[in-house]
Image (tube, helix red, strand yellow):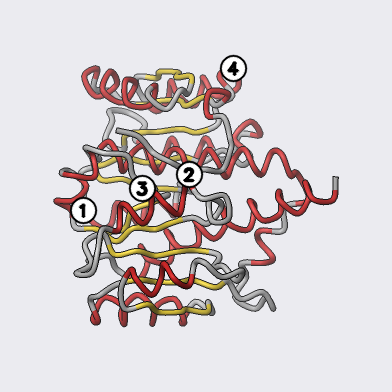
């Protein structure tokens, strides 16, 4: 089991603060996060976590929502007011309903996961957010992310999508176009693989996990392992059962996962997150060419 990301950032230098009032869940998440090589801090509730921030100085906070006293939403709001949390992502975990997702983002969270998340889902979310954090720290004020991803920007991100499911293609691409992105559609993996041989590459790839014409996981791994395409983020469209099944059993090249049933808000959030990563990685490669 493992995540192939290909962006060259060492997660061993990152620290994750875990916040949960359940001792079993703390031990479970600690073990899962440590498989990424990250350092781990532990807090038993929201109030303790907020007090720990100045000393711990985490690179990411993974926090339960339902806790006695200060819950995860309130703790996230307090954390985002602290200078030490500038640019530090918070991921909230809960088994609550759809409104919990909206409240998470309103509180300032960078991510939201249903509890308990699958191992691959948890690790990909943490890895992606830590990679973004690391690139932002490396680039500093040279990172032009906010301006480039603004809807009114002259920069129009190019997103390629490969799927043999016509209704899925139409739903996702219509959302991409509403966001002002340029979408190119491939009716399967074969035409996508051919297009990836060209010099013109997308800012983001979206792959259906189980297309009728091949193995998206193998294609994803090849994309991630090839020097020319290793920097391109991959969003994989999955069923809930996929996250709890075969995707947990073998290495996967996806940067993030999105349920096929996801609503417009979910699609927008995941796509913009990975485009942020793509822009940062492109900026780093330009800087290195100039050096």
Q: Establish if 142 lies above or below 172.
A: above
Disc 2 from disc 3: Cα separation: 13 Å
Q: Which structural element holds mark 4?
A: helix
Total number of numbered labels?
A: 4
Quick check: marks 2 and 3 in contact, CB under 8 Å?
Answer: no
Image point 58% across, 71% down: which residue?
Answer: 157
Image point 23% across, 39% down: which residue?
Answer: 248
Q: Give neighbour class at mark 2: few <14, some 14-19, many 20+ (Cα, 10 Å).
A: some
Mark 1 = which residue?
97
Which of marks 4 and 1 precedes in the sequence? Answer: 4
Image point 47% across, 46% down: which residue?
Answer: 225
Disc 4 from disc 2: Cα separation: 24 Å
Which of marks 3 and 4 precedes in the sequence? Answer: 4
Image point 25% across, 40% down: which residue?
Answer: 117
Of discs 1 and 3, which sits in the foreground? 3
Rendered image: mark on residue 221:
none
Which of marks 1 and 2 precedes in the sequence? Answer: 1
Disc 4 from disc 3: Cα separation: 25 Å
Mark 4 = which residue?
55
Rendered image: mark on residue 128:
2
Of discs 2 and 3, which sits in the foreground? 2
Q: Position of residue 22 (x, y in %)?
A: 23, 22
């Amino acid at each position: 089991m493992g995540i192939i990301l290909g962006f060259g950032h060492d997660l061993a230098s990152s620290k994750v603060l875990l916040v949960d009032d359940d001792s079993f869940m703390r031990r479970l998440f600690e073990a899962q996060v440590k498989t990424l090589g990250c350092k781990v801090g532990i807090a038993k509730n929201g109030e303790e976590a907020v007090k720990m921030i100045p000393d711990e100085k985490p690179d990411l906070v993974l926090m339960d929502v339902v806790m006695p006293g200060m819950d995860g939403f309130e703790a996230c709001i307090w954390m985002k007011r602290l200078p030490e949390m500038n640019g530090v992502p918070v991921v909230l975990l809960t088994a609550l309903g759809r409104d919990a997702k909206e409240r998470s983002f309103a509180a300032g969270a960078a991510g939201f996961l249903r509890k308990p998340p699958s191992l691959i889902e948890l690790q990909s979310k943490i890895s992606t957010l830590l990679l973004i954090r690391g690139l932002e720290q490396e680039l500093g004020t040279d990172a032009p992310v906010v301006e480039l991803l603004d809807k009114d920007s002259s920069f129009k991100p190019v997103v390629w999508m490969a799927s043999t499911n016509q209704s899925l293609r139409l739903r996702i691409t219509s959302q991409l176009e509403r966001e002002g992105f340029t979408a190119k559609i491939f009716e399967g993996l074969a035409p996508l693989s051919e297009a990836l041989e060209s010099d013109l590459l997308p800012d983001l790839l979206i792959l259906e996990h189980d297309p009728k014409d091949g193995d998206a996981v193998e294609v994803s791994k090849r994309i991630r392992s090839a020097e020319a395409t290793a920097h391109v983020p991959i969003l994989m469209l999955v069923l809930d059962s996929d996250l709890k099944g075969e995707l947990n059993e073998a290495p996967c090249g996806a940067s993030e996962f999105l349920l096929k049933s996801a609503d417009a808000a979910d699609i927008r959030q995941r796509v913009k997150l990975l485009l942020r990563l793509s822009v940062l990685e492109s900026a780093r490669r330009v800087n290195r060419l100039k050096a």
